[in-house]
């Protein structure tokens, strides 16, 4: 294929705040290396939407922000959050509108123990912990239906409605079952139908009904409280774990935590139908405590880039980036401080890019 016919991916880049601005260029560096090796091109368009922009303009993104993002193949996001801006402003002003408007109803987070990363759990070896968390990303507990009455009085009350729709529950379960079928054919559902007696039994019913269509997938379910304990005590029990927005949120921080640094954990906000752009971002935030020092670990961003490649259909390139991350962690002395080294963000990014180039 000559250069003119080369496939081009159009990507909206939102580096955001703090270390987002430091790790995103490393993600791009590695994805550029993958493009070179596997014969495709990237067209990056940067958007300076962030808490800093909010402080200047009063908005996290312009009024037509979602329309601006709509034509892109995907969104590559760093992190948003600043100590001077309340976290609900950055979340409800940017991330949640993107996730909802683009029906990114799956939040996918892989959890994997790598050679070269110390887990806070004792006695686990690389390869023994390898599972994926599928979080419902559009509805559930994170709804803006509710309100307060009699504010500031003795009678004050607050109500927040949880919303589970059949369509919303079934589509995320469908994704999780399909993923389990492609992996080790085991799906675990997070529930709490003993205490939460309307929405969670509904979730469980949908889960059981869909399980009958996947006789090849082994299923189990746990209440969220004991499930968190099993994540720590028996992380090898899991292949794919599916949960509602709240339960998935908690599990998807706990999962990466049990296998090591928050700095390496990736996530994908997926519109599985690919009718609308999906968004790829590391699990970590803007890390104001280390921002500006050039020592943030770029692997969470780079691995998110690998998930983006896979979503865009470039599986071979995605595998190459995954392998480069694993190889660098296992054998390179180039490591950022969070994983026990003294290298910079750029040095680690370049080390991985070099592996991807095959040099
Ligand atoms: P955080 O993930 O930014 O930082 C937690 C701790 O992990 C800090 O000690 C930080 O230095 C360390 N850390 C995080 N990423 C790292 C990396 N790549 N390399 C090395 N160390 C790393 O979470 P925190 O402190 O709770 O939140 C800071 C800001 O980020 C807040 O404003 C929060 O709202 C925002 N945030 C944004 C997210 C997003 O954009 N999706 C997700 C989580 C938090
Ligand atoms: Mg979270």
Image (cartoon, rainbow, N blue to C red):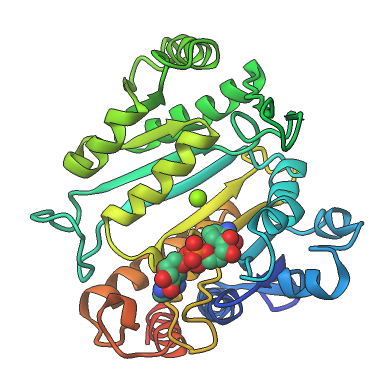
**Residue 45, position in %: x, y?**
76, 73
**Residue 57, position in %: x, y?**
87, 71
Above or below: residue 307 compared with residue 117: above
**Residue in the foreground of this view, choosing between 276 and 281:** 281
Name the residue rendered at 70%, 70% in the picture. 13
Is residue 226 rendered to the left or right of residue 174? Answer: left
Work out whether residue 341 can be spotted.
Answer: yes
Asked which quadrant contains residue 225, the reply is top left
**Residue 147, position in %: x, y?**
75, 30
Work out whether residue 185 can be spotted.
Answer: no
Q: Quadrant of the N terminus?
A: bottom right
Above or below: residue 188 compared with residue 81: above
Extreme residue toward the front, this view: 154
Name the residue rendered at 23%, 35% in the picture. 230
Name the residue rendered at 42%, 10% in the picture. 212
Name the residue rendered at 79%, 69% in the picture. 54
**Residue 202, position in %: x, y?**
53, 11
**Residue in the foreground of this view, choosing between 272 and 158:** 158
Is residue 200 rendered to the left or right of residue 183? Answer: right
Q: Quadrant of the C terminus?
A: bottom left
Above or below: residue 294 compared with residue 105: below
């Amino acid at each position: 294929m000559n250069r003119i016919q080369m496939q081009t991916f159009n990507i909206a880049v939102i580096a955001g705040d703090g270390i987002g601005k430091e790790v995103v260029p490393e993600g791009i560096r590695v994805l550029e290396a993958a493009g070179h090796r596997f014969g495709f091109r990237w067209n990056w368009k940067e958007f300076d939407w962030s808490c800093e922009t909010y402080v200047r303009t009063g908005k996290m993104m312009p009024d037509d922000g979602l329309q601006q993002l709509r034509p892109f193949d995907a969104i590559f996001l760093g992190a948003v959050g600043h100590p001077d801006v309340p976290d609900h402003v950055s979340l409800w002003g940017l991330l949640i509108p993107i996730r909802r408007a683009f029906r990114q109803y799956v939040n996918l987070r892989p959890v994997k123990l790598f050679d070269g990363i110390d887990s806070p759990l004792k006695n686990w070896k690389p390869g023994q912990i390898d599972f994926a968390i599928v979080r419902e990303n559009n509805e559930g507990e994170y709804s803006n239906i509710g309100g307060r009455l009699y504010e500031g009085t003795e009678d004050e009350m607050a109500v927040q409605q949880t919303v589970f729709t059949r369509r919303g529950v079934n589509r995320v379960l469908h994704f999780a079952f399909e993923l389990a079928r492609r992996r080790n054919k085991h799906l675990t559902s997070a529930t709490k139908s003993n205490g939460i007696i309307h929405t969670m039994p509904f979730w469980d019913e949908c889960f059981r009904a869909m399980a009958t269509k996947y006789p090849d997938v082994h299923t189990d379910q746990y209440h969220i409280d004991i499930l968190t304990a099993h994540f720590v005590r028996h992380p090898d029990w899991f292949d794919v774990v599916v949960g509602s927005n709240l339960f998935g949120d908690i599990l998807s921080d706990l999962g990466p935590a049990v296998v090591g640094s928050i700095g390496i954990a990736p996530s994908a906000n997926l519109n599985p139908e690919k009718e609308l752009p999906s968004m790829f971002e590391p699990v970590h935030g803007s890390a104001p405590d280390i921002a500006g020092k050039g020592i943030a670990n770029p692997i969470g961003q780079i691995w998110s880039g690998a998930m983006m490649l896979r979503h865009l259909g470039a599986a071979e390139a995605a595998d190459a980036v995954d392998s480069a991350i694993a190889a660098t962690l296992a054998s390179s002395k180039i490591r950022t401080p969070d994983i026990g080294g003294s290298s910079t963000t750029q040095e680690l990014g370049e080390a991985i890019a070099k592996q991807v180039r095959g040099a």
